[in-house]
């Protein structure tokens, strides 16, 4: 049996990263899999291990992308505790009561807006260490 080359690509419709095999006619074969989180985690770990931003260049050595990664220590960080400080007609501002982080919800982005869930720099309630 011939070894088929694995193809990895992002869906332009769903922004999901898929891995699988491509048929001769250029369509996905049976068994494509959503590998979004494992792919993102692998890239993040690769960049961290590299120890510097990773620059992806084209065939002419012109930079196309620069990837940098910031690691959040989830073992010591806490969930943000959001408080609305400026309700508005078109946007609303929230501030974390523990660390002071700010988040703005815009009316034209409400369907996709979620308050950030991790990265609170406070180590105890009230932001005191």
Image: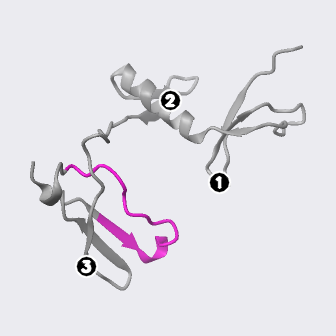
- Label located before the other in sequence (1 or 2): 1
Measured as percent of width and height from the top left, residue 12 is found at 66, 50
Q: Which residue is mark 1?
A: 14
Viewer-proximal residue among 21 and 67 = 21
- Left or right relative to 46: residue 101: left
- Left or right relative to 4: residue 1: right
Compared to residue 105, the image places residue 20 above or below, namely above
**Where residue 86 is drawn, which disc sits there?**
3
Check the picture and name the quadrant holding the N terminus: top right
SS majority, magenta: loop
**Where residue 22 is drawn, which disc sits there?**
none
- Left or right relative to 50: residue 2: right
Q: Secondary structure at mark 1?
A: loop
Magenta span has 36? no
Say which of marks 1 and 2 sits in front.
2
Q: Give the Cα separation between the discs numbered 2 and 3.
A: 39 Å
Measured as percent of width and height from the top left, residue 127 is found at 13, 56
Measured as percent of width and height from the top left, residue 77 is found at 26, 46
- Label located before the other in sequence (2 or 3): 2
Q: Give the Cα separation between the discs numbered 1 and 2.
A: 20 Å
User: Residue drawn 38% across and 71% down?
Assistant: 105
Q: Which residue is mark 2?
A: 42
- Label located before the other in sequence (1 or 3): 1
User: Residue drawn 45% across and 24% down?
Assistant: 46
Q: Quadrant of residue 58?
A: top right
Magenta segment range? Answer: 103-121
User: Residue drawn 30% across and 55% down?
Assistant: 79
Residue 62 seen in the figure: no
User: Residue drawn 84% across and 40% down?
Assistant: 27
- Left or right relative to 9: residue 80: left
């Amino acid at each position: 049996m011939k070894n088929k080359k694995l193809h990895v690509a992002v869906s332009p419709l769903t922004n999901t990263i898929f891995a699988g095999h491509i048929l001769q006619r250029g369509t996905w074969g049976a068994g494509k899999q959503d590998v979004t989180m494992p792919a993102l985690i692998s890239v993040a770990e690769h960049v961290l291990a590299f120890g510097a931003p990773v620059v992806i260049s084209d065939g002419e050595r012109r930079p196309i992308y620069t990837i940098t990664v910031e690691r959040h220590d989830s073992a010591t960080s806490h969930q943000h505790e959001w408080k609305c400080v400026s309700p508005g007609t078109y946007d609303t501002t929230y501030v974390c009561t523990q660390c002071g982080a700010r988040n703005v919800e815009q009316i034209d982005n409400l369907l996709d807006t979620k308050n950030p869930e991790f990265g609170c720099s406070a180590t105890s309630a009230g932001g005191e260490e």
